[in-house]
Image (spheres, grey):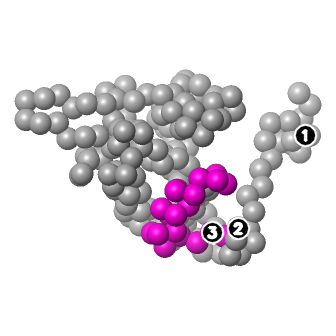
Amino acid sequence: MNPARRPWRPGGAGLSPSVCMYGIAEHHQLRHQVTIGAQDLQADGFGPNPFYHCLLAELLPRPGELPGPPVGYALFFFGYSVNHGRLVYLENLYVEAPYRGRGIGKTLLSEVAKVSLAHGCVEMKLMVMEGNHRAAAFYQGLGACDTTADEGWHCVELGGLALHRLAGEEL
């Protein structure tokens, strides 16, 4: 299957940011942890200095048919490593359940890799939930390294109250 890929545009046809965000959260049974809404996603992804970029996968319509809704997406943003330079961070790669196993995720990931290289990135970083063995095997099959197991790196996060306390702010 060779789906069409296109950048996500505000107001365009297809999935809204919140539908995508909730879809992956529900897939991982983490819907209760989502604290932002569609307006935040719209402002953060489509303002003058977007915090993220997103590619959609759509099934190509037959002649005379209108395009159907997107069946997957890849949400990513750029960063920097003092060890290696420019990098891209893949935040979400999601394909609707009926379309999994058809190469759509790999196609989206390949497109993110092309965008990354065009921007001078030298690596892609991402996280996989513990227990998501299918995703871990998918990425490792593409040559990804599990830095937690192989290099002892752990993802650490300061969020919410801890971030405000560190900044010296009281809530």
Residue at 25% x, 46% y: name it.
4
Three-letter residue code for mark 2: Thr
Three-letter residue code for mark 3: Asp
Counting every numbered tag in the picture gives: 3
Identify the magenta region.
129-147
Residue 146, by quadrant, is bottom right
Mark found first going from the N terminus, 2 or 1? 2
- Location of residue 101 with respect to 162 vertically, above or below: below
Three-letter residue code for mark 1: Arg
Mark found first going from the N terminus, 1 or 3? 3
Q: Which mark is residue 146?
A: 3
- The residue wearing badge 2 is 148
Task: Name the element at disc 1.
Answer: helix
- The residue wearing badge 1 is 165
Dot 2 and dot 3 residues touching (CB under 8 Å) = yes
Q: Residues within 10 Å of mark 3 (few under 14, many from 20)?
A: some
Query: Is 135 inside the magenta-drawn segment?
Result: yes
| Residue 86 visible somewhere in the drawing | yes
Closer to us: 109 or 146:
146
Residue at 42% x, 39% y: name it.
97
Q: Nearer the viewer, mark 1 or mark 3?
A: 3
**Residue 20 falls left or right of residue 1:** right
Task: Name the element at disc 3.
Answer: loop
